[in-house]
Image: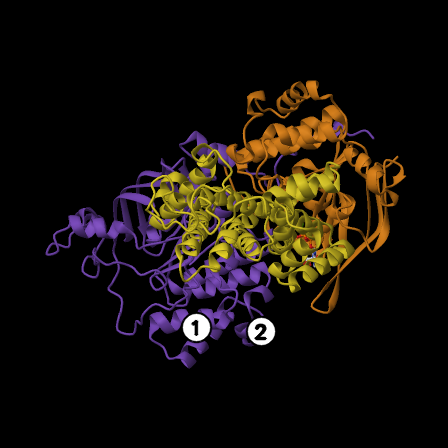
Amino acid sequence: MSPLRRFLRKPEAVAGAILLAALVAMALSAPMLFPGDPQAIAGPALLPPFQDWSLPLGTDRLGRDVLAELFYGARTSLAVGLAAAAAALAIGSVVGTLAGFAGGLVDEVLMRITDAFQTVPGFLLALAFVSVVGPSLGIVVIAIALGTWTGPARVARAEVLSIRERDYVAGARVIGMHPLAIAFREVLPNALPPVLAMSSVIVAAAILTEAALSFLGLGDPNRATWGGMIAEGRAVLRTAPFLSIVPGIALVLTVLGVYLAGEGIVETTAVRRGLS
Amino acid sequence: MIALASIRDLTVTYRRDGNEVAALKTINLDIGAGERLAIIGESGSGKSTLALAIAGLLPASSRIEGRLDWFLPSSPSSGAKAPPSVLPDISPPRGEITPSFRLSPITEIASKELPSKLPISPLAGEMSGRTEGGGTDRQPKFVPLGGRDIGFVFQDPSASLDPVMAVGKQIAEVAYTHLGLTWPQAYAKAKSLLERVRLPDPDSALRAFPHQLSGGQKQRVAIAAAIAAGPKLLIADEATSALDTIVQAEIVALIRRLVAEDGMTLLFISHDIALAAELAERIAVFRHGELLELGPTAQIVDAPTQAYTRTLLDAHIGLDATPLLNRAGLNA
Amino acid sequence: MNLLTVSNLTKRYRRGGKTIAAVDDISFHIEPGETLALAGPSGSGKSTIARLVLRLIEPDAGHIEFEGNDFLALSGAALRQRRARLQMVFQDPLAAFNPRSTVARLLDDPLRIHGIAARAERPRRIAALLERVGLAADLAPRAIHEISGGQRQRVAIARAIATKPSLIVLDEAVSALDVSVRGQILELLLDLQRQERIAYLFISHDLGVVRAIAHRVVLLEAGEIAECGDARTVIDAPQSAIGKALVAAAPRLNRTRP
Ligand SMILES: Nc1ncnc2c1ncn2[C@@H]1O[C@H](COP(=O)(O)OP(=O)(O)OP(=O)(O)O)[C@@H](O)[C@H]1O
Ligand SMILES: [Mg+2]
């Protein structure tokens, strides 16, 4: 049975994939459906949803189109989530591989650094970093990656430690391959599967962290973000609760979708690896 | 020869990612009670599949056709308890086979085809013509139980022993489960079994964990667990292949002695024709899932009818073989 | 002059508080184009010697002289360069190759690393190497798990001879092969030795094979040399206890009509 068929047999994985597909469609279609600036004023302030069909989800306190903001927010969430997770996985894999493969002092130093990062809560680290450097999309990505690379690093190191003793690594040394080439060409690709298995959790966490940063006003001020929308709506939570509820639901569904689809992929590929 | 089991038109097909691989093709084979039968063949010839089919351990992903009939006196089932969580003597062998097992449907097929009131195997008539008596105590519909009636020894003893359980307990558990002994009796039995397989210092070995034993010692423990319930049939699947020649010779001698002492039937599976010839009375040669040739050891070794068997014999490099080396080649 | 001279080589391991000498003060030599076999029971130190000679692990004491140079003094780039002359074939060819690699990539590595052939010329060199070990050149694009065990061991030999070594260490290189394939691989090794004068350090516990292929043999027991000398002389009439035990344990095929 092909992995795709096996994936399609899991209803929760399919549900996740559908949620994720909807999110991607939102992100990609935003500039086409809403060509203007989503942060520009589009109508009267605090228009409730389903009143005016040119503004289906109404407007916020400043009269901005909530639906347009929601679509552009999907773009930010997805971009930041994927970029931060990719950065965390890349940093973690490289650090873990170097530590595990080199051993000795290099391992000791790299793992102490990893410990240091791990003792500080990731969110606090991101918060501090953005407050010092100043908020922009790139900085938010780096800030989130700084707090999440340690998990992948540990997993990669453990995997590398076991691969390092295999005959084929000895074989690569015997033909005179450079240690760095052995580490990154021969060992790392085979250590990746368990590291990549963590990606769904990391992407979901990164999306939540981004939302939290924007909620605290530390997101990129020039972009629509779901966290920023929730924070905006908080001031009028009594009178216009939908302003917070709509982006909140979007956030929950996105995190759920990423997680379910990711787990589905990991499970189907793990089954395949177990069989072969 | 009184048959212990009779295999008729056995075909086993593995399904793997949409492909069907025939591991055994219409095999017909009788295993005589009390005989030492060797199954030899190279990798992929279907030797292990045959062993698993006989023990009813084929994976669920396999398709089985044909029938397997047993002729065993009915075993006392009074003392039998529910199987323990860990059956140390039955565990998946390496490679090729997916790890989930179910009882062989062969026996189900056989019982479906046979009306329950007429327990007559197609072989029964044929057999009674050749053998004297024996017909009364044979029960064609008997379904053997792995661990109790069939003992299994695999190539890799670490795979069949539980790494976190003392070896004494693993052996005692088999005796406790299948023989209806109390735990103290089962431990006493385990100790006597460790003595029988000549493990040095059986008292401390009872408390040892597998990783504290050498490869040869672990294989002795695996054999002790396999024979703990007094099986009728001992299946050794490449049981000595991972061991060095000295230990291999010791284990072969041990198996030969135990089989003789207990009157067990031995199915010895190996790729090494010389080793098989030293131990077995009959040899079956398998290739590409087919049974090529079957006969008494002397006949297979001295007068093989198949060219492939001759190839296997000629490929053996014994201590009296003509050296391959051209001595003139070295003039340093 | 000797190709390889090993003197007083010692390697100790600590295990559970106790120190065991896996290799204990061992000396031997190999001449160019010669096959020296290391035989002995499991745990006698055969693989440890192989790894020491290949500088995969470092000895606690002793000297290794290879092609007239102090091999233990080399390090870094100089060591990597010299490795071209001293190659290895492992027991399990599947474990000895990166599971993701193709035949072509495995053979490309040594050619690239040692600058033996320019990139454009390499496919031709790879085809020639495959042919040299009796494989079809169109095997090159195959993944390593898509070829048979015998073919894999031929690829391992092709990779080992790609850098034109003077010595190849073979650690149980034919033990995992089907017997019908084993004979062909041994023939290939002998043919390479005749043509290119490659010396072999041939590790095996199968005395039948050792007697058939080796010039000289070193019998090991518990990290020490029990007996050494001409392979047939030693195996036909072993003097040491371990030699006698190994000979007695070898399976015999008593064919009256061979
Ligand atoms: N990394 C290690 N750590 C601890 N002990 C080791 C290590 N490698 C080998 N040994 C020990 O060194 C001794 C020699 O082992 P070695 O692998 O050289 O034996 P061998 O002759 O190759 O055996 P085999 O025929 O089983 O391959 C053994 O006692 C082994 O347990
Ligand atoms: Mg070894």
For mark 1, does the 10 Å Cα neighbourhood hold few (<14), some (14 to 19), or many (20 or more) residues?
many
Find residue C60 and report its horizontal and vertical position in percent.
82, 56
Specify the colour of chain A: yellow
Front-most of residues A33 and C198: A33
Q: Please count the marks in the image.
A: 2
Q: Which residue is mark 1?
A: B172
Relative to B103, A231 lies left or right:
right
* Front of the two marks 1 and 2: 1
Q: Which residue is mark 2?
A: B201
Find residue A81 and report its horizontal and vertical position in percent.
54, 47
Q: Quadrant of the N terminus of chain C?
A: top right
Specify the colour of chain B: purple
Q: Quadrant of residue C72?
A: top right
Please say if the residues under marks 1 and 2 sit with CB atoms less than 8 Å apart.
Answer: no
Residue type (three-letter) at the residue carrying disc 1: Ala
Residue C238 appearing in the image: no
Find residue A239 and report its horizontal and vertical position in percent.
40, 60
Front-most of residues C128 and B54: C128
Find residue C153 and report its horizontal and vertical position in percent.
60, 34
Front-most of residues A36 and B43: A36
Circle 1 SS class: helix
Residue type (three-letter) at the residue carrying disc 2: Asp
Q: Is residue B50 above or below residue B199?
A: above
The residue that appears at 56% across and 34% down in the rendered structure is C144
Relative to A115, A233 lies left or right:
left
The residue that appears at 54% across and 67% down in the rendered structure is B198
Specify the colour of chain C: orange
Circle 2 SS class: loop
